[in-house]
Amino acid sequence: MLIHGEVNPLNVFGLRRLEHCPPHFEKILFDLKCDIKIISDWIYTNLEGRFYLGDHSYSQDGVFTIQTLAAFERASEASYLGLMLDQINKSLYDF
């Protein structure tokens, strides 16, 4: 992590954030309340492995739903984001 003075080779070569979600990644679905850049900046700052961040749509009982999907190669990083998500994913209008 760069905050500790270590350069991540995946960041240097642009291989950290993936454009597709591999099936073996650990997934977290959530409703996005803030700008997605806030979430991605937190991931880049606090985590080290490869990840996917984007929209996930599905239909259940005729209802079409779109949520945000964060998926990680390391299951421990998915757990860390899951624990911190309430602190990061805040609306500007929540008091």
Image (spheres, helix red, strand yellow):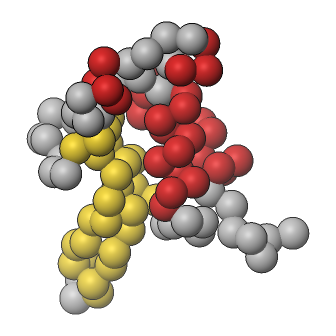
From the top left corner, tell me how far across and down residue 82 is, in percent: 52, 40
**How many numbered callouts?**
0
Residue 80 visible to the viewer: no
In the image, what residue occupies the spot 19% across and 51% down? 19
Image quadrant in which the C terminus is located: bottom right
Residue 6 visible to the viewer: yes
In the image, what residue occupies the spot 33% across and 78% down? 65
- Determine whether, in the image, residue 86 is placed left or right of residue 31: right
From the top left corner, tell me how far across and down residue 78 is, in percent: 42, 33
- Determine whether, in the image, residue 28 is placed left or right of residue 46: left
As drawn, 1 above or below 15: above
Question: In the displayed image of the protein, which residue is found farthest to the right?
Answer: 95
Quadrant in which residue 71 is drawn: top left
As drawn, 83 above or below 8: below
In the image, what residue occupies the spot 34% across and 52% down? 53
- Determine whether, in the image, residue 92 is placed left or right of residue 59: right
Quadrant in which residue 34 is drawn: bottom right
As drawn, 75 above or below 95: above
As drawn, 86 above or below 3: below
From the top left corner, tell me how far across and down residue 57 is, in percent: 25, 72
The residue lying toward the viewer, choosing from 17 and 80, is 17
Question: In the displayed image of the protein, which residue is found farthest to the front?
Answer: 12
From the top left corner, tell me how far across and down residue 32 is, in percent: 51, 66
The residue lying toward the viewer, choosing from 60 and 69, is 69
- Determine whether, in the image, residue 40 is placed left or right of residue 13: right
The residue lying toward the viewer, choosing from 21 and 37, is 37
Question: In the displayed image of the protein, which residue is found farthest to the left?
Answer: 23
